[in-house]
Amino acid sequence: MRPGSRRPRAAGSSPGAAALPGPGPGRGSGPGPGPGSGLGWRLRARLRRFTRLPAPFVALAAAAAALLLLFGLVGPRGEPGTQPPPPEPALGALLAPLDPQRLRERFLRPLLRERVPGGPGSRDARQHIARCLGALGAGWHVESDAFEAETPRGLVTFTNVVATAAPDAPRRLVLACHYDTKVLAPERGGHRVFVGATDSAVPCALLLELAAALDRPLRRAKDAGAEVTLQLLFLDGEEAFEEWSPRDSLYGARHLAARMARTRHGPHGTQISAMELLVLLDLLGAPFPAIHSHFPPTLKWFLRLVTIEQQLRRLGLLHAGPQDPPFFRLSPAPGPVEDDHVPFLQRGVPVLHLIPTPFPAVWHTLEDTEANLDPATIADLAKILVAFVAEFLRL
Ligand SMILES: [Zn+2]
């Protein structure tokens, strides 16, 4: 991914706008507006109208809205008050199957090697992902989306992995990460290779751990014919081979989003319109991540993460204590970040981009290794995400 400049971006939301409590009741509950939809302008127009009201009324309304949002009374699907936090015993039972040792040893370690598109590490990573999901009871449907694309290094074969718990379910909560590694210039005189622990082996391992921890409830939901299922995207070719550009980056995401937009799903939609929300994980695993909301249409979902984190900290269920800086921040994102969500966002998919800004200090260096990961942060993120996914899917 690439940290974007502060210039206005095509998606129509400035970093400042992203921090505002944009979605009001009843707004943005379906697929969010895509690029060029002018959301930023509409939001600003609404704010202008708002500021013509008497000042005490504005202050009172703003305070009430802030409280509602802060305490997470707006549910994941924009249904105020319908998603009370689960009671402590239920939360404990939900989180109990998470296993940090399994995450690290079974899911993460085999990924900690070079995973350059088209190479043996990439092939082994895909086989590993398919094996891990295949061993679960939820009966994951795992497909490969292989294609060739022209790159600055010539023709390269890329392969995305698309795993769906219940392929026939009408709608999908999609979690995504990239599994390729950047090709770094060889170390002078050294033998180390770039293994991209945070970029993005840990996000891939988190997705596998989530699938394992939620295996039984996912199976039950599938058997019960639940409306919304879980889909996992392991994307190839996120990294640029040379200079980041629209043509040299996001190879897998661009190909898959275009393919999904052409692939029918259900009587009236496509695989893209079936995506209720795309949660993209990237650069996770280093200590003290600061993750911000990037898109006003999905702020309500971001606020659920804020609330879940606060609740787990209060209950003493995280390594991080109530006094530690939160992972999920209400402050504005320092700026936009170009990443695998872009081709999906451009097609109207609502996106939560879970990426720390600033990036980890080890980003795109040979130091992005297991030794520099923070297991406590990874375990805490896994708990927050499991609670979020279970709530979203009503597991
Ligand atoms: Zn990278």
Image: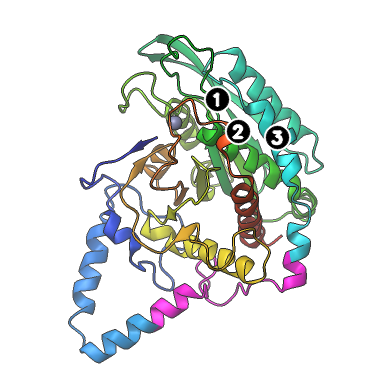
Residue plotted at (35% across, 42% down): 337
Element assignment for label 3: helix
Mark 2 or mark 3, which is nearer to you?
Answer: 2
Mark 2 closeness class: few <14, some 14–19, many ≥20 residues within 10 Å:
many
Mark 1 closeness class: few <14, some 14–19, many ≥20 residues within 10 Å:
many
Q: Is mark 1 within 8 Å of ligand 1?
A: no
Mark 1 or mark 3, which is nearer to you?
Answer: 1
Toward which corner of the image does residue 393 lie, by quadrant? bottom right
Q: Can residue 165 be seen in this view?
A: no
- Residue placed most toward the observer, 323 or 96: 323
Q: What stretch is highlighted in magenta?
A: 64-91
Estimate the spatial distance between the alpha carbons at disc 1 and disc 3, rounded to whole Å.
15 Å
Circle 2 sits on which residue? 370
Q: Is residue 347 left or right of residue 133?
A: left
Element assignment for label 1: loop
Toward which corner of the image does residue 250 lie, by quadrant? top left
Kindly check if marks 2 and 1 are in contact, taking CB atoms under 8 A apart as contact. Answer: yes
Give the tally of numbered discs: 3
Circle 3 sits on which residue? 107
Q: In this view, does 133 lie to the left or right of 366?
A: right
Q: Is mark 2 within 8 Å of ligand 1?
A: no
Instruction: Pinpoint residue 82: horizontal percent, then vertical percent.
Output: 59, 75
Instruction: Pinpoint residue 108: horizontal percent, then vertical percent.
Output: 66, 34
Kindly check if marks 2 and 3 are in contact, taking CB atoms under 8 A apart as contact. Answer: no
Circle 1 sits on which residue? 195
Mark 2 and mark 1 lie on one chain; the one further toward the N terminus is 1
Q: Can residue 151 be seen in this view?
A: yes
Three-letter amino acid code of the residue under disc 1: Val
